[in-house]
Amino acid sequence: MSRLVVLKLGHGNWQQGLPIVIAQVWETEGATPMQLTGSLPSAPELAKIYQQWRSLYEAFYHPLCGHHASTRSGIEIEEEGVTHVSRAKFDQLSQQLKHQLDDWLNASSFSKVERRLRTKLSPLDEIRIIVETDDRQLRRFPWHLWSFFDDYPQAEVALSAPEYKQVSFSRLASANQVRILAVLGNSQGIDIQQDRILLEQLPYVETTFLVEPQRQALDQQLWDQQGWDIFFFAGHSTSQPDGELGEMVLNQTDSLTIAHLKNALTAAIARGLKIAIFNSCDGLGLARDMADLNIPQLVVMREPVPDRVAQEFLKQLLTAFSSGRSFYQAVREAREKLQGLEDDYPCASWLPVICQNPAEIPIDWQSLLGKASPAIDESLKPEVFTTKETGRSRSWKSLQIGLATNLLITTIVMGVRFLGALQGIELKAFDALMRQRPAEGTDPRILVVEVTQEDTNQHGYPLKDHTLATLIEKLEQHSPRAIGIDMHRHQPQGQGRAGLIAQFQKYPNLFTVCSFGSQDINRAPPEEFSEAQQISQMGFSDLVLDDQDVIRRQLLSYDPSLATSPSACSIPYSLGFQLAFRFLYTAGIQPLNVNANQEWQFGSVTFKRLSTHFGGYQNLNGLSSEVLINYRSDLPGQRVTLNQVLQGSMNRNVVKDRIVLVGITAPIGRDTLNTPYGKMAGVWIHAHMVSQMLSAVLDGRPLIWTLPQWSGWQWGDMLWVLVWSFLGSLLAWWIRSLWLLGFMNVVVVFILYQVCLAILIQGGWMPLIPSLLSLLLTSGVTKALLIDIRRQA
């Protein structure tokens, strides 16, 4: 966003103070501004340091600026130049001047104005700060040293006279060319041919050069009926000590003030002259005179300027301005790049200053070409190029480049994804999205009996058979739908083995576990179980670990014949599957079987097995009957402890008609695994799995799904990624400002994240990481290509 801040300094000066300082802030051109009022105290020490700095500056630069450089300070130096000591003193004064300026502007009477400005402005805004004053010393001051500009990288300062007005322009149309009148004045002691070369290299320009012209020739050209866009002067110039009058040296004998050209310049401004550039010494007097003519904007050097500095500034200014930067951004960029010369030319970056007519909207290069209204925000213009040969618009070609880049990068990203290179980061992003979902509450159909550390301290570990049998009996008294014991009981544990086995014969809704993935005999089925009991009252406890050791998938059932190694546990169904099946069977849900696609169907819900490529997964076997776990953000059931059940201190209603899972949560059980929600005991993971199945069938809670695919080709994901990639190329094509483009990319990434989160709440796993990569890569590459094409155009 473009912002305008006008600081009206009013009457007074820095020696006596400024009793009323008004700051006006415009958000959009022509809108009613916000207005703030403060004041600035007297600053005699600041005035003193400035005068010392300026005197030493002129002494230092006297031998560097040519024969016509100003020597108002009266300081004379020896032929060999300024000594090391004087350079050190100059650097010290420069730092003191900056600190004194900040101290002055941090005065309590003005700091409240700055604080309000900071709350209204963003570092991403392009900010024009116009200092409105008629005091010659305040106009000379390097306002860009204010620490405010360090925090706002797209802000630049300009000077303005207190009185100004808008000019009515009457300009004949130019054939998509910028018309420049370039005056190359007296060049004694300086090389202004480099300025000419730089102007000649500009694209889409018609430049008329006047080399050391006579006054009559310059006056005649200014009256040209077709009008000029830019007036440029290079050579020698100077201003009077009071800063009220400036003078240009045209040739070996003639010098002119702005007053000598008043009528011609007024006519040129009325016919469309928008910018004046005085790439010469000490131009504030010229700027003050030009302001009386209400020229929209100009740039001058506030002090004597070395030849090398003037050439480098012009080069950087023209490059930035003609490539699409606003005039203010171009001046700041060019000015800051002068800092690289300051080993040889100290304070070079202090010299350029803009002078602005606040009644006029700053112009840009595209507007000078006649392609757009200057009221349109520069940063929001699409990339439009014009050929030198025909002037034909190449906007469509630039858009084609964006579309081609979009398709290429999307294909590359999806190819890299297909090979599995993005699987790790996609799974982590999936976990992050899972954790961002809103709370759902517990599942009222599930109860978990935890064997805590306190329980194992009292009853030992592993639990004795008689303790487990007592627990089962107390639970069965309250009529649960099913009980799942997540403990391996292959061998007897203490007293009461017969009673425990009898419980399984007595209660067909009682289930325990074994492990098909373990060779440990202790994880085999109880020796006393018949083959029928193994099928009907057991489930495997194995959990599917991803390559990051996180439990994200639920294995419903498997074919024991496909096992990679022999196991005493050949149970085909998981514990969660057995418990959910029992609950749904007693609830009368039909069907409860495998459909024609060999996928489990419970009622109207089909648990579709994960394919080889599913979401971020790219190397699943595609054969197992497994689904992603749609974890609840809260615990999936109510919890009680072993002692609470044994002591009868729980409410019977927490057991009646529920699925009860019993498992170890004490650290000694070493049954804690990683999930998207952090570490979780195995019994709670099984509870999530049971809850997922019941909620999907009975409540319509979604299972995790992805966009459609065909034979392993995730074409739905690719179209999704292509849309976001296209948005990246569209932003790069439409937005000229790199800062704004970066900000908009951040905004779109945030929107992408929120969209993926909203869809995941409904069960959909969208390709967040591929979309993000394609969006940013397409935006960056497209912008780089467009900039390169524009420079070559």
Image (cartoon, rainbow, N blue to C red):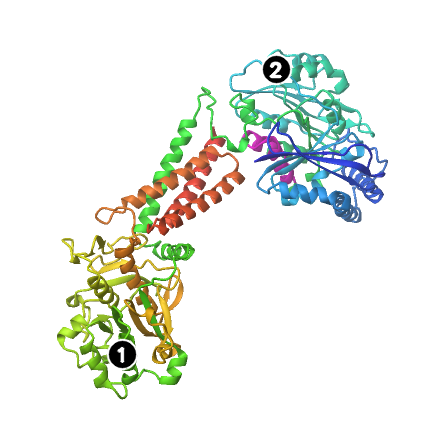
Quarter of the image with the N terminus is top right
Please give the range of residues in magenta: 317-338
Q: Where is residue 659 in the image (x, y as percent from the top left)?
A: 28, 68
Q: Helix, strand or loop at disc 2? A: loop
- Contact? badges 2 and 1 (CB < 8 Å): no
Q: Is residue 57 left or right of residue 342?
A: right
Q: Is residue 443 above or below residue 202?
A: below
Q: Where is residue 129 in the image (x, y as percent from the top left)?
A: 67, 35
> Residue at image x 26%, y 71%?
479
Q: In this view, does 464 lie to the left or right of 793?
A: left
> Residue at image x 61%, y 14%?
170
Q: Helix, strand or loop at disc 1? A: helix
Q: Position of residue 758 (x, y in %)?
A: 39, 48
Q: Distance between the residues labelled 2 and 1?
A: 102 Å
Q: Residue type at mark 2?
A: Gly
Q: Is residue 754 visible?
A: yes
Q: In this view, does 1 lie above or below 240?
A: below
Query: Which residue is identified by label 2?
Result: 227
Q: Residue type at mark 1?
A: Glu
Q: How crowded is mark 1: few (under 14 residues within 10 Å), some or many (20 or more)?
A: some
Say the numbered circle drawn on residue 473: 1
